[in-house]
Image (tube, rainbow, N blue to C red):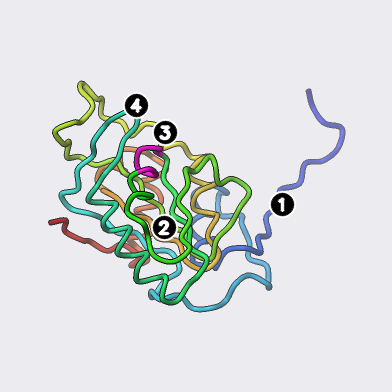
Amino acid sequence: MRSEYPVKLLKTQYRMHPDISCIIGKTFYQGLLEDGNTMPSEPSSFKSAFVMIHLDNSCELFRDQSYYNPAEAETVKALVNALSKRYEDIGVLSPYTAQVNWLVQQKLAGKCEVKTIDSFQGREKSVIVFSSVRAHKEGQFARPNRKHTIGFVGDGRRLNVALSRAKDLCIVVGDLHRLKISKVWKSIITTAAKQGKVFRVSCA
């Protein structure tokens, strides 16, 4: 059914640091997203408010119909421990319940809140650390006969929700080579790499 009234895109955002909204706008809003003049301006601990950390040799595991990645969880824990010295309002998001449960068991520093993407809709944090989980390397308990996909971690709507929850700093942690299977992730990674926002870490 067609509307009798004109449809107008609400294209001005007031939540995110411009470094974050730049990625969100280009990926999900055809570059039409604009920054209002009241968005957060406090500089982050990094050179950019949007950062991607590529993990070499992390390993995805599968149990209870969900994926988790212990090596990635260790990296997230180290990040939260460091960030909690400066920020009180930190959230860690992951698409997978098994990863959320694993992270909760790690007892992250400060008042960090760990949630799935779906349970965090409509909320925001000063800092969001996104744990993507999926990796090229499979562990002993990997899911058998998996296809070369990344499942709903590549869902653009969920991804938009997850990354746009951050006000001052958004950090994506994962196997970026694996994520590039998804067109939306490939767009984000390519844009971030051109802007010097991608860093590489080797897992033990």
Give the alpha-carbon distance from disc 3 to disc 2, as whole Å. 18 Å
Q: Which labelled disc corresponds to residue 129?
A: 2
Q: Which residues are magenta?
A: 96-101
Q: Earlier in the sequence, mark 1 or mark 3?
A: 1
Q: Earlier in the sequence, mark 3 or mark 2?
A: 2
Q: Is residue 164 above or below residue 180?
A: below
Give the alpha-carbon distance from disc 2 to disc 1, as whole Å. 26 Å
Where does residue 22 sit, x and y in percent of width and height?
A: 51, 61
Q: Residues within 10 Å of mark 4 (few under 14, many from 20)?
A: few
Q: Is residue 64 above or below residue 81?
A: above
In the rendered image, residue 98 lying in the magenta stretch gets the answer yes
Q: 34 and 153: which one is in front?
A: 153
Q: Secondary structure at mark 3?
A: helix
Q: Earlier in the sequence, mark 4 or mark 2?
A: 4
The residue wearing badge 3 is 152
Q: Secondary structure at mark 4?
A: loop
Asked where in the image residue 108 lies, by quadrant, the reply is: bottom left
Could you tell me which quadrant the C terminus lies in? bottom left
Q: Residues within 10 Å of mark 1 (few under 14, many from 20)?
A: few
Give the alpha-carbon distance from disc 1 to disc 3, as whole Å. 26 Å
